[in-house]
Image (tube, grey):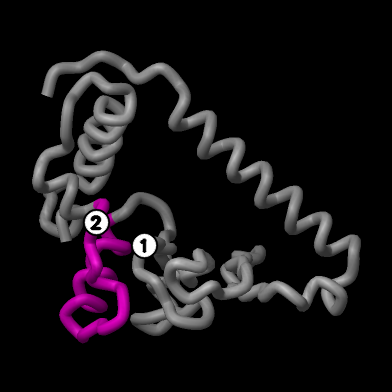
Amino acid sequence: EHLSHHSRAEDAIRELNLEMSLYFSGQIPQVSERTSEVVWTRNYGQVVNERNCYELQRTLAALPGNVSRIVVGHTIQPSHITSACNGAAWRIDIGMSRGTYGTRPQVLEILPGGRVKVIKSGTAGRMGLGRLKQVATAVIAQLQLVKNWFTRPAPTYEL
């Protein structure tokens, strides 16, 4: 909702990224309520209504490029990866911890052309070893990018 109500989505994203960067690098003690709202929203969790989907479509349209979906965690699904808003929101937190549902691992694969595939543990044999290695390599590369982003030195700015 924050992005769809901002005059320039690029500016809103830049502000959010800067604030999170400052927070994770220890330069500020906490994030603003606005940023916290974006990071911790539960609008795409268990119960999704038309208003949530409308705001999501507005937000996706406001983003630069051709963004057609978001992938969210921290909205535990009881048995498997699910989607909402006609595939515009994918919920990938499946509660693998024994403290929640103890669900077996699953992966959301986004393929060229925008096609989405849910890979559940136990299906690796049907997938073939070559394809499984490709998926594992891609996941490791993405995790490395995330690690690099979070461990890079944060620029020093004043808010």
**Quadrant location, the N terminus:** bottom left
Percent across and percent down for residue 10 are 27, 42
Residue range (magenta): 39-62
Mark 1: few/some/many CA within 10 Å (<14, 14-19, 20+): some
Quarter holding residue 100? bottom left
Residue 50 drawn in magenta: yes
Report whether 101 appears left or right of 140: left
Q: Is residue 17 above or below residue 99?
A: above
Report whether 74 appears left or right of 26: right
Q: Amino acid at mark 1?
A: His
Q: Which residue is drawn at the image coordinates 22% and 62% (left, top)?
A: 41
Task: Say whether marks 2 and 1 touch (CB < 8 Å).
Answer: yes
Residue annotated with mark 2 = 40
What is the C-alpha distance between the residues marked 2 and 1? 8 Å
Percent across and percent down for residue 60 are 32, 63
Return the mark for residue 74: 1
Q: Which residue is drawn at the image coordinates 26% and 69% (left, top)?
A: 56
Q: Amino acid at mark 2?
A: Trp
Secondary structure at badge 1 equals loop
